[in-house]
Amino acid sequence: MIASAASGQNAAQLYRQHCADCHGARFQGGNAQSLVDGIWQFGGEEEAIARNIRQGIDHLGMPDYGDELAEDEINALVRFLLDSEKMAIEQRSRIPDTLKTLDYEIDVELFVEGLEVPWNLAFLDEKTALVTELPGRLRIIEDGKPDPEPVRDTPEVVAEGQGGLLAAAFDPDYKEEGNQWIYLAYSHGLDPEPNGKRAAAMTRVVRGRINGNRWVDEQVLFEAPHDTYRTTRQHYGTRLVFDRNKVLYFSIGDRGKGSDAQDRSKPNGKIHRILRDGSIPKDNPYRLKKDVMDSIYAYGVRNPQGLAFHPETDQLWEAEHGPKGGDEINLILPGRNYGWPVITYGVNYNDTIITDIVRKEGMEQPVWYWRPSTALCAIDFYSGDLFPKWNNKLLAGALKNEDVRLLDIEKDRVMHEEVILTGAGRVRDVVCGPDGAIYVVLNKPGTILRLTPKK
């Protein structure tokens, strides 16, 4: 057992200074996991927590503080974390019944509960949806009820850190006879090295069908060269979206190595564009270019956790999860460089400087950015009849701030933002459903909320 820390140690201040930007001001998680959900991935005993603070967790991007914090400071911080977890569990906030916004009063109902780290929600129609769970499960939701048995034989995932079953999408022509394709993106791992080195992983995209609650007919659409796979377990950043021409776009984060985002021979730190069979569109900006991956559509992105097409313009917008500061909303254009890590409005989690440059010729500026970070995640444009005043406005979810924001976009400018939901849990996905309702996927707790105008 760790001895008591020195009397008078200001552990709360230590937490704010060293931990809050990743784990959240209220311990709820953000760039890193929640500290008040009762789950300690690397050991919840005092000694284990102290060791992780002292030594860091390199493959997840957690720095070591052994040289920065004295032993009594580490001990005080451990005790503070455990006390805070106990208090949070006892005083867990409940999901609100109603919300008030500038335009609407909103009813909040529990759509689905009991999920384990839900990550992405995809609708086929008003009755049918799919939800991915990070540990590797894909569930069918029919009439608001998830199948208690996940789809069998889905791809094996590397379910560590931020890796797992990351995204799902229905083919735009799913209901046509002979189609029924479903697209999945996940962290694909190679076999471990003989010397015991951790298995390398990278985002992989496949399509298949569900027959009798079993995954069948799988086809690999995108698999990066294996020498580009990385042993880190963060910044997968994956989403799947189709444009009006039924071309598939997907994002891959920098996987913890920022310089790769500027290297067009590597898949990470990029927005990719492929046809539904995995082939490369003839108008891709780097098709047939030497030493460049021809699936690349845009590059220089850090951790793109949200992609969405504007309902009227069909422009591609991206939500970029930044470092400490520097969460971004970007308008993605073909062949453009979005700057990471050469330019950024953020700093490293330990407050060291990434770069002094925020603008550079040949690199795109964000349409909107946040300092401090909200831990930006998924985005979707609203399009429906239930909230007509919100048509074409952008919904943006956040992990650290546990909120959903509504951004009013005029051409390529954000004119206004409003928080419409906060404090219900870590927002992993936000989706405009085919019924016009807004669906909010929460990681803590593992639930999906449905927002509709108050009757």
Image (tube, grey):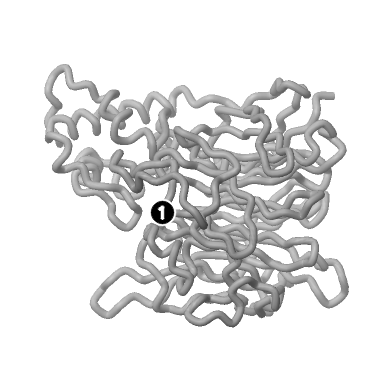
Please, which residue is most extreme toward the top here?
A: 8
In the image, 65: left or right of 349?
A: left
Q: Position of residue 357 (x, y in %)?
A: 39, 46
In the image, 74: left or right of 336?
A: left
Please, which residue is most extreme toward the front here?
A: 361
Q: Does residue 49 lie above or below 57 as drawn?
A: above
What residue is drawn where x is 20% and y is 42%?
65
Question: Alpha-carbon neighbours of circle 1 within 10 Å: few (<14), some, or many (≥20)?
Answer: many
Comparing 173 with 94, the one in front is 173
Q: Secondary structure at mark 1?
A: loop
- Does any portion of residue 219 appear in the rendered image? yes
Comparing 230 with 440, the one in front is 230
Q: Position of residue 310 (x, y in %)?
A: 75, 49
Q: How many marks?
A: 1
Q: Position of residue 354 (x, y in %)?
A: 34, 47
- Does any portion of residue 149 appear in the rendered image? no
Q: Position of residue 375 (x, y in %)?
A: 49, 40
Comparing 172 with 394, the one in front is 394
Which quadrant of the figure contains the C terminus? top right
**Residue that label 1 marks:** 341
Which quadrant of the figure contains the N terminus? top left
What residue is drawn where x is 64% and y is 68%?
273
What residue is drawn where x is 38% and y is 70%?
200
Q: Amino acid at mark 1?
A: Pro
Q: Does residue 118 lie above or below 259 as drawn?
A: above
In the image, 79: left or right of 310?
A: left
In the image, 260: left or right of 252?
A: left
What residue is drawn where x is 42% and y is 34%?
24
| Quarter of the view holding residue 129 | bottom right
